[in-house]
Image: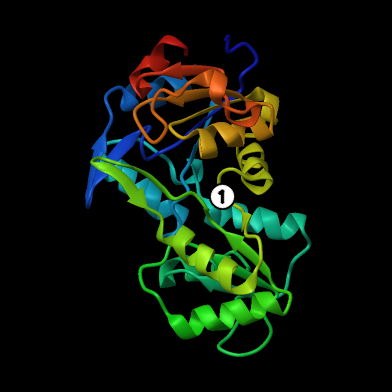
Amino acid sequence: MRLDGIRAVVLDVDGTLVHRLGDEVQVQPGARDVLARIRESGRRLAIFTNGSHEPPEWYAGNLRTAGLEVADEEMLTPLRSVQAHLRMRHLDGPVLALAPGPAREYLAGEGIRLAGDNGPVETVFVAHVDTVDFPLLERAAHAIIAGAHLLTASYAPGYAGGDGMIISRGAMITAALAKASSARPVIVGKPSRAALRTVEEKVGARGGELLVVGDDVTMDVALGRLGGARTILVASGMTGRPDLGALPDRRRPDAVIGDVAELLDWL
C-alpha cells in the first residue's frame, strides 16, 4: 500500500495512541513522533475517539496533559458526529440525551434541542453514562416505542485498556433500550456515515483521500472502509493480529502494523 494522494490522517486514541490504566494515560512509543510527522508532511490530522462523557475539548486537553500535542479542533467524538447525523436526517426535534452533565451542556451549546423533564422526544441519544437512572431509561424506552429514533455513540462491547478491555457502559445502556423497545440502535460514532461526514468536513478531504489508523476492525477499519479510505490496523489494541483472510471485506485493513511507532515508516 502506498500513501500517494493521502491528504489527511485519522487516528484512533485508546489502543492506538494511548493505553489507559484507571486514571493514568500511557502514551504509546512513537505516538508523539507520528503526530509531528503527519503535520510535517502537510497532511491534515483528525483524532477520533468514541468517548462521549465529556466535550471534545476535554479529550484533547487530557491527551495534552499526557504529553501529546493535540489541538482542540483536531479532536472528534460522537458528540460532534451526532450533530452531523441529525442534520443529515433533518431531525430538529427534542433530543433526550442519556449522558453526563458536561456532555449535555456541550450539545445544548451546539444548538441541539434537549428534551425537558416532560414533553415530546424525537430522538434518544445514548452517550457514555456513569450511573443508571431507571426512570430515565423507562422514559427513553417509552419514547422509542412511540416512534423516537434510538442513536448511540458506540455499540461496541468495549475498547482497549492497559490491562484488557474496558467495558462500554453506553453500549450496555443502549442494549437495554433496544431490548425493551425492540428497536435497532443507529451508531453515530465509529463506524457510521455521520462519523465519516464529520471527519471529511473537519479535514477538508473526501473518503478516498483519507488514511484511517486504529486498533479495532469493527470501528476504525470499518469507518475507513465506509468511505473508501486506506486503512491500517494497529495490533496493539482490541483486534490484535487477525487472520485477514477470515475477515469480511468491510473490516479488512489494507495493512497491519505492530504498534503506532511503525507508522513512521509509512509517512
Q: Is residue 14 above or below residue 125?
A: above
Q: Is residue 246 left or right of residue 39?
A: right
Residue at x-position 53% and y-position 56%: 153
Going by the picture, which residue comes out furthest to the front?
Answer: 246
**Residue 265 position by quadrant:** top left
Residue 201 shows in this picture: yes
Check disc 1: other Cα within 10 Å, few if <14, some if 14-19, many if 20+: many
Residue 34 percent across, percent down from the top left: 38, 22
Q: Nearer the viewer, residue 166 or 109?
A: 166
In this figure, which colouring scheme has been used for the structure?
rainbow
Q: Nearer the viewer, residue 127 or 113?
A: 127
Residue 191 percent across, percent down from the top left: 59, 43
Q: Is residue 254 above or below residue 240?
A: above
Residue 30 percent across, percent down from the top left: 30, 22
Quadrant (top left/top right/bottom left/bottom right) for the N terminus: top right
Residue at numbered disc 1:
189
Q: Is residue 31 left or right of residue 254?
A: left
Residue 42 shows in this picture: no
Q: Is residue 15 left or right of residue 208?
A: left
Q: Amino acid at mark 1?
A: Gly
Q: Is disc 1 placed on a helix, strand or loop? A: loop
